[in-house]
Amino acid sequence: MPADDPAHRLAEVHAAIAKAARTAGRPRDAVTLIAVSKTHPIAAIRPLIDAGQRVFGENRVQEAQTKWPALRAAAPDISLHLIGQLQSNKADEAVALFDAIHSVDRVSLVTALAKAMDKAGRRPACFVQVNIGAEEQKGGVAIADLPALLAEARGAELPVAGLMCLPPAAVEPAPYFALLARLARDEGVAGLSMGMSSDYPTAVTLGATHVRVGTALFGTRA
């Protein structure tokens, strides 16, 4: 099987997750691989579906709406995750399309999602995004404000599945992953959405339950 074959790349990522899980004494099935298909066309996504991948991540509601109805028609068991920032005015569309939302980071969005979920009668899993490196250019709730936002989300009956983070680029991510894991323990939250193509094995050893992998599966974006 050629090294650039989608099935080969998928198998390599699964093997790396399994190795990291073993290192940490964790079961392999404790980690969900999210194939980040943002910016990739349907033609690039289908081979991964054919190879057995069933969980995918998109950054934008509008882009997902153009691709996934057709893909899901052929594979209805696909789970679709929104991993990018979400505007409150897109809450209805996000709730209708996605099975999980990884970027809940402010009270106004909690309110919009709660209304959208009540209206739609479906409740996608929600991850609260933490600005783990206190970076002004990134989304996410400040660490100090996390307990209050979690209280708002729980009070609004959002299904809080875990925490999510994007560590600062070009630095060792392990301390940030360890910090997110500690915050999750302190707040009684089970899920940890952390780790991307460059660092997902490290994230798995530190407790990631969901890793968001794009380049290692699809190759470098044009």
Image (tube, grey):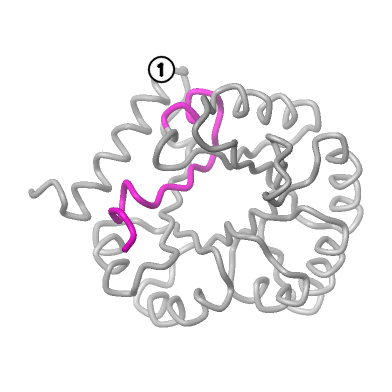
Quadrant in which residue 86 is drawn: bottom right
Across and down, in percent, residue 185 comes to 74, 27
Q: Nearer the viewer, residue 132 or 207?
A: 132
166 sits left or right of 23 in the view? right
Across and down, in percent, residue 53 comes to 34, 56
133 sits left or right of 167 in the view? right
Name above or below for residue 155 compared with residue 21. below
Q: Residue at x 45, y 76 (%)?
A: 68
Is 75 magenta? The answer is no
Name above or below for residue 169 compared with residue 181. below
Q: Residues within 10 Å of mark 1 (few under 14, many from 20)?
A: few
Is 202 magenta? The answer is yes
Name above or below for residue 197 compared with residue 177. below
Q: Could you tell me which secondary element the residue under label 1 belongs to?
A: helix
53 sits left or right of 96 in the view? left
Please count the marks in the image. 1
Q: Residue at x 73, y 37 (%)?
A: 134
180 sits left or right of 30 in the view? right
Quadrant including the C terminus: bottom left
Q: Residue at x 55, y 60 (%)?
A: 81
Residue at image mark 1: 23
What's drawn in magenta, residue-wise? 201-222
Across and down, in percent, residue 187 comes to 81, 32
Identify residue type, mark 1.
Answer: Thr
Across and down, in percent, residue 82 comes to 58, 62
Q: Nearer the viewer, residue 24 or 77?
A: 24
